[in-house]
Image (cartoon, rainbow, N blue to C red):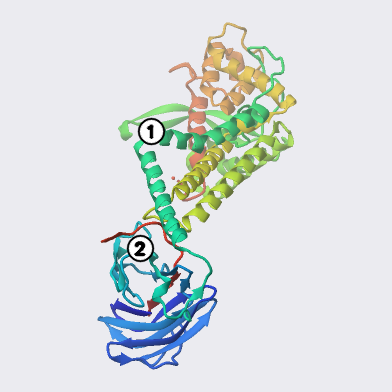
Amino acid sequence: MREQITFAFTGPFSGAYRDIPLRSGESIDDVSVSEGTKRYRPGANTSLGGFGLPDSFGVEKFDDTLRIVWHYGAVDEQRTFTISYRFRGLALAYDDVVDVNLRVWGEHWPTGLGRLTATMQLPRETELSPSYRVWGSPAWVRGVVARLPDVATLEASQIATHQFVEQRVVFPRGLLTSTAGAQVREGNALERIVAEQAGDQRDYQQDRDRIDDAKRHLGRTMLLLLLLGQGPAIALLGIVWLAYGRERKTGYDREYEQAPPSDTEPALVPSLLRQEPSPGSNEFTATLFDLIRRGRYASTSVTTERSIWGGLRHEDIADLQLTLGDTSVPLTDFEKPVAEVVDSVIGEEGQRLSAFRDTIEGDRASNSKRFTSFKESVTSAIKARRWFASDGGKVLALGILVFVVAAIGLLWTTLHGFRSAAPRWSEVVMVALGVCAATNAASLIVGITKAPLWRRRTPDGQTEAERWEAFRRYLTDFPRLQEAPPATLELWERFLVYGIAFGIAERVLQGAHLHMPEAVHDRSSIFWITPHGNLGSGPTALAIGDLSSGFGSALSPPGSSGSGGGFSGGGGGGGGGGGGGAW
């Protein structure tokens, strides 16, 4: 074997190496390195990146690989090195032919190659008979082979990084005078070798035909990928919804509930209806007004001046002044953070509702922690009531795990040896299945964020939810109903508190503007309906609109926002190859 390798150096370099794999029965000896007429001295250091005297080389064998390392000095220049060695056992001598399958360029080279020329000298001249064959592989490498009476040649160009090239030559056994350097095998092999090469070429062409067919029928291919990429996830989501998410009817048939059906706190009811224990600013605001209703804070009607038209004009608007009330009012765990926020805002002298948002933003770091504590406490309270059965979430989580593992396994094992220049059909299918598994996992991840798909209420929770849903319908339709309005102040105020929690406070205010008796209104701590303006206008409407929309941002953490012939077959059976590099 005689290899001439030309390196184009940019910058200073002092060493290079060549790794050659060895299979069973193969060995290499009589190694030498030269450059032009200069022969390198043996015995040098074989550590990659290590120091060695220029014009020297070393040889080391490890893990069925022979490593040749040589040392030199080069700066911004082109140098050609010749590596020579005797490769025993590479040739396989059968009864009829000798098979020499050599990987003339290995897949471990970290750089591409512009031009490759390989020449194999026959033991002596022979006629161009059927028992003398030359193949180059793989088929996707641009190259040609030729057979002459005394040599077989291969030429290839533009070889990609980590792309091997093989030259396989079969010639009559009679050309050898000795088999001392070959592995002797019994039987005839020419017919089998020709069939192997034809099979490789046939497999390659079948892969190309299948891929081309998929490209030509793109609509069919996309439909199939869509079915594989979404069908399993949709089917699993449907099964989970039927088994675990679909609500069971209780026989409740009333359209309206004209009063809150239970004493469940306003911060908990919206989560019960939407099956999602994640409270927000509406629940926080409703809890604040519930504390005012229960006397934890006292309210006084006041008037606040507000600038309009960019400050060109001012107008007086109705407002509420809040001060500390009865501190002995018992508080739940999730009401305590709300009270802490309000206490920090009103201080000893009190504060107007219209100024709450700005004051809260002034101490956003502390108040955001209190808001987080409020949400966590509400979630804990909801879980403690055991309103929901969430077994479907475990099924979806298992489905996500299965699809993710399948996607990683398929893509990792396939892409590791993926032939990007000429992919196998099996590789394309495996990659497609891996991507489909990933998209199914993504769909399930989206599905698991939609709690009603996999979570349903317990029988007790469903009964209470249906009653609260009827009460919400009543509040929504309340302004236009002709039924008798609430008779007590407590019921009016509870209407407003739950209306805030449901996000329909303006509907309750409109109903109060139409139906609330003046004597009842005058005694309320949270209603103040002005006789002017639109239905529901007044200080309460101002405060609710400001607080409910502003708490989300005001209580968020600081800083947050959003002639022969061409190459054939796949190859892959040649000896030698390997790779190398320089430093």
Q: Please, what is the three-letter code of the amino acid marked with disc 1?
A: Gly
Find residue 225 and report its horizontal and vertical position in percent.
46, 37
Q: Which of the numbered marks, if any, corresponds to residue 576?
A: none
Which quadrant would residue 113 be assigned to in this image?
A: bottom left
In the image: residue 79, left or right of residue 245? left
**Residue 224 vertical placement versus 23 (above, below):** above
Q: Which residue is painted at 41% across and 36% down in the image?
A: 222
In the image: residue 198, left or right of residue 267? left
The residue carrying pointer 2 sits among few (fewer than 14), some (14 to 19) or many (20 or more) residues within 10 Å by Cα, namely many
SS at badge 1: helix
**Residue underneath mark 2:** 136
Q: Which of the numbered marks, if any, corresponds to residue 219?
A: 1
Find residue 91 and report its horizontal and vertical position in percent.
45, 73
Find residue 468 and report its horizontal and vertical position in percent.
65, 21
**Residue 35 vertical placement versus 217 (above, below):** below
Query: In this view of the protein, which residue sits in the foreground, 207 or 510?
Result: 207
Query: In this view of the protein, which residue sits in the foreground, 148 or 66?
Result: 148
Query: In this view of the protein, which residue sits in the foreground, 331 or 388?
Result: 388
